[in-house]
Image: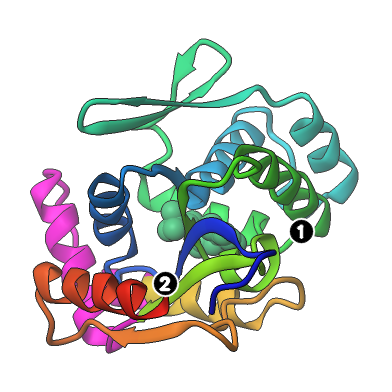
């Protein structure tokens, strides 16, 4: 997997609830790289579009919105905050409404073009763990290490359900699974940059694995390939 043109980038793609975020954060800490949460960027675009009453499928208005959007990550000890201008939107983007709206908006070419350009700018120097849906396929095809995490849909729904309960939401398990399936379908079926593993990605089914076990598999693969 290595070569002179390969960048020091680790990509982690996969569907919602596959364990991407937890593993990406941990892996970044372990190898001393920055963590790039690209889902958060699509969430921020959706949040701002919602606040301004912009139609989630209107390319012209969305392109304009993206062009003027001042998105900035701030990484501190233990957290990764996202700002729009001076406002910390890290909490506001994590709602069930933003789960679905970010998925809808991410199918719009103009939005993807803007986010891809920004992600590449952030990753220019390498040394990042980039998490998302199209990191290994579209944004950083030259990444040195690529992983694709997946898990059975009921297990992913259960993880999401527990996360939402822990956040104090009262929600039905079936509702969480229904939303997750809808988002999977939108993200996998869209024409541009759909959720698919890169040909050279290591696919890991996390259904029956602990975080530690997945982490060990990833580090072992990286050791073998370097
Ligand atoms: O990873 P997440 O759940 O925060 O992502 C929210 C949505 O953003 C997801 O449903 C699809 C979209 N997304 C994308 O299209 N490409 C990415 N690289 C990351 C996220």
Magenta segment includes 176: yes
Q: How many numbered circles are shown? A: 2
Report x, y in % for residue 141: 66, 69
Local packing at callout 1 (Cα closer than 10 Å; few below 14, some 14-19, many 20+) is: some
Which secondary structure is most common in the magenta stretch? Answer: helix
Magenta segment includes 154: yes
Local packing at callout 2 (Cα closer than 10 Å; few below 14, some 14-19, many 20+) is: few
User: Mark 1 or mark 2, which has the lower sequence index?
Assistant: 1
Q: Which residues are magenta?
A: 150-179
Q: Residue 108: which disc? A: 1
Discs 1/2, front? 2
Q: Residue at x 75, y 45 (%)?
A: 117
Q: Give the spatial CA distance, label 1 vs label 2.
A: 37 Å
Residue 179 occupies which quadrant of the picture? Answer: bottom left
- Residue 174, visible in the rendered structure: no
Question: Who is closer to the viewer here, 226 or 10?
Answer: 226
What is the quadrant of the C terminus in the image?
bottom left
Residue farthest along the right direction in this orientation: 60
Report x, y in % for residue 138: 70, 68
Q: Residue at x 27, y 89 (%)?
A: 152
Q: Residue at x 23, y 79 (%)?
A: 217
Report x, y in % for residue 197: 54, 83
Relative to 46, residue 205 above or below: below
- Residue 207, visible in the rendered structure: yes
Question: Who is closer to the viewer here, 160 or 115?
Answer: 115
In the image, taking residue 206 as reference, residue 131 lies left or right, namely right
Q: Secondary structure at mark 1?
A: loop
Q: Which residue is mark 2?
A: 226
């Amino acid at each position: 997997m290595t070569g002179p043109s390969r960048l020091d980038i680790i990509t982690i793609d996969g569907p919602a609830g596959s364990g991407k975020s937890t593993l990406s954060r941990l892996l970044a800490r372990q190898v001393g790289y920055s963590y790039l949460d690209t889902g958060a960027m699509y969430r921020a675009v959706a949040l701002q579009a919602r606040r301004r009453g912009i139609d989630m499928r209107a390319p012209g208005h969305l392109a304009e919105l993206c062009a003027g959007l001042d998105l900035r990550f701030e990484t501190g000890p233990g957290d990764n905050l996202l700002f729009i201008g001076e406002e910390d939107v890290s909490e506001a983007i994590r709602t069930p409404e933003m789960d679905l709206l970010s998925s809808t908006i991410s199918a719009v070419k103009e939005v993807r073009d803007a986010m891809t350009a920004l992600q590449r700018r952030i990753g220019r120097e390498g040394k990042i763990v980039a998490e998302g849906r199209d990191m290994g396929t579209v944004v950083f095809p030259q990444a040195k290490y690529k992983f694709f995490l997946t898990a059975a849909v009921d297990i992913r729904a259960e993880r999401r359900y527990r996360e939402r309960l822990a956040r104090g939401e009262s929600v039905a398990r079936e509702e969480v699974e229904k939303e997750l399936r809808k988002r999977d379908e939108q993200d996998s079926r869209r024409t541009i940059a759909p959720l698919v593993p890169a040909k050279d990605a290591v696919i890991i089914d996390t259904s029956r694995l602990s975080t530690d076990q997945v982490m060990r598999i990833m580090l072992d693969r990286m050791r073998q390939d370097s």
